[in-house]
Image (tube, rainbow, N blue to C red):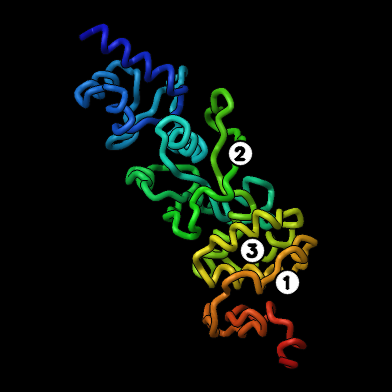
Amino acid sequence: MGATRSRNLKKVLDAVPAGYLVDARWLTAQDIAYETFRDYVKRGWLERVSRGLFRRPVPSGDEADVIDWKVCLLSMQCIMGYDVHVGGATALDQQGYSHYLRLGSPGPVWVYGNAIPNWLGKLTLDAPVKTRRMTLFDDPALGMTNYAAETETARPWWDWKITMSTPERAILEAMDELPDQESFHNLDMVFQSLTTLRPKLLTALLHQCRKIKVKRLFFVFADRHDHPWRKRLDPNAFDLGCGDRALVSGGRIHPRYRIMVPREFVDLEADDGA
């Protein structure tokens, strides 16, 4: 029994860098019994963070009460094997496309997945977390990338990278949050910098996108900024639905894409001549 416990403990110590997290689900998958968790905590090999969630202590023993969200996501993806990704405005920000300053508290971290553990929403992270199911696209894996992001409290071992949406996918995810969770102004500033999007990937994502609202909004922004890649996309090639779509109060119906947007997003000359 002692030899088995030692082997199991070694698996934990080898797999989990100092400062990183594991949950009861992962521990039991390593053949570690529930009654052993308490012994590991008592001996200082693990630190209890919340119910069913543990952290490997750092050598100094000086653990911060607030957990770096990147450490949390790397732990979920690279250790515990959760099928989650960072998307939306967070993915755009991490890849250098955030052109506005958020005043006050940090913006939310957008996490997408169909089996997100309950403990994620209960953690004290250095940024709030908003979760979404992966329902926007027919192919949930389309438009993903692995991004190397150093953390403040613990750097990832080896070549660990955070799985997140490419800019092409992330901008569509962000538009899905208009107008309640994202603002037209902020996304307009971000879209201004999206000069190098890949039309082939955009085409695939737009065909896979399940929401008419998102596809129409994308072309509203694309026409407004008219980046070189816009010429490679034909709106008539995509299912944009029919009929007007209300989105914001006090706005105007876009003359081409028939969706309600803020007045400044409508070309008045085109509107008057329509």
In the image, residue 208 lies at what x, y percent?
54, 60
Mark 2 vs 1, N-terminal side: 2
In the image, residue 196 lies at what x, y percent?
75, 53
User: Would you name the residue on which mark 2 appears?
Assistant: 147
Question: Which of 186 and 261 lies nearest the eye of the viewer?
Answer: 261
Residue at (62% x, 49% y) in the render: 166
Is the residue under label 1 in contact with that under label 2 (CB below 8 Å)?
Answer: no
Q: Nearer the viewer, mark 2 or mark 3?
A: 2
Q: Is residue 240 visible?
A: yes
Kind of residue indicated by mark 3: Leu
**Which residue reaches farthest bottom?**
273
Kind of residue indicated by mark 2: Tyr
User: Would you name the residue on which mark 3 appears?
Assistant: 187
In the image, residue 182 lies at what x, y percent?
55, 64
Residue at (61% x, 85% y) in the render: 253
Residue 262 higher or lower than 179, as above or below: below
**Which residue reaches farthest right?**
228
Residue 79 relative to residue 158: left or right: left
Give the alpha-carbon distance from disc 1 to disc 3, as whole Å: 14 Å
Residue 237 relative to residue 77: left or right: right
Residue 95 higher or lower than 254, as above or below: above
Helix, strand or loop at mark 1: helix
Is the residue under label 3 in contact with that under label 2 (CB below 8 Å)?
Answer: no
Give the alpha-carbon distance from disc 2 to disc 1, as whole Å: 29 Å
User: Would you name the residue on which mark 1 appears?
Assistant: 223
Please identify the quadrant where the N terminus is shown.
top left
Kind of residue indicated by mark 1: Asp
Mark 2 vs 3, N-terminal side: 2
